[in-house]
Amino acid sequence: MDKLPNARKPAALTKGHNQSQSELRARIADEERLKGKDNEVNVAPDFIKGWETAEKYYHYIYHLLADVDILSNVDRMGVGALAECLAMMEQSNKAMKNDELMVEQRTKFGIKMVENPAINTHIKFLDRFRTLAVQYGLSPSSRAQLSAMTIGDRSSGNSELEKIINS
């Protein structure tokens, strides 16, 4: 399976080694235009509406990211997918608590012991969550990437990020 290229950083987080300041400003303006409106981002998408657990996680993630001001209406589906993963993980955790690690399975040859299917469900949604979480800055490594750009000069107010934003 071919590995996908790394996602491109937003212009506001780019150090500017490959682009001039005017190109970065133009990219920032384009990205802001493409970001679109954010008047509906607080409303869970239809595919999780009515699923109380998923909606709870959607609003939790929304409130975590609202302070950072990175979400817009186009992010509703991605945040909804994150919430769905968390809800499925919660559901599989409950199933694992109620059952053993190995469960009986009836086959045409009789009964055999197999791994609890809730374990695979949990792992599948955990992997999906990890992939999506990186895109929204919910992992320690993705937060570290963002903070690394400003940590050196934060006290003096001259970080690369602040220079790009203020230029």
Image (cartoon, rainbow, N blue to C red):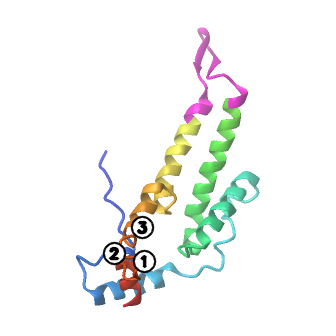
Image quadrant assignment for residue 9: bottom left
Q: Is residue 121 left or right of residue 131?
A: right
User: Label 2's element?
Assistant: loop
Q: Is residue 58 left or right of residue 165?
A: right
Pick whichever of labels 2 and 3 is earlier in the sequence: 2
Residue positioned most to the front: 155
> Is 89 inside the magenta-drawn segment?
no
The N terminus lies in quadrant: top left
Tag 1 residue: 155
Question: How far separated are the C-alphas under marks 2 and 1?
Answer: 20 Å
Pick whichever of labels 2 and 1 is earlier in the sequence: 2
**Image vertical order of residue 96 relative to residue 140, above or below:** above
Dot 1 amino acid type: Ser
Residue 90 is situated, as x and y percent measured from the top left of the image, at 67, 43
User: Label 3's element?
Assistant: helix
- How packed is label 2: few (under 14 Cα within 10 Å), some, or many (20 or more)? some
Image point (40%, 89%), residue name:
166
User: Label 1's element?
Assistant: loop
Dot 2 amino acid type: Thr
Residue 75 is situated, as x and y percent measured from the top left of the image, at 55, 69
Tag 2 residue: 14
Image quadrant assignment for residue 71: bottom right
Q: Which residues are magenta?
A: 97-120
**Which labelled disc corresponds to residue 146?**
3
**Which labelled disc corresponds to residue 26?**
none
Q: Nearer the viewer, mark 2 or mark 1?
A: 1
Image point (46%, 62%), residue name:
143
Image point (41%, 76%), residue name:
154
Residue positioned most to the left: 18
- How packed is label 1: few (under 14 Cα within 10 Å), some, or many (20 or more)? few
**Image vertical order of residue 54 relative to residue 145, above or below:** above
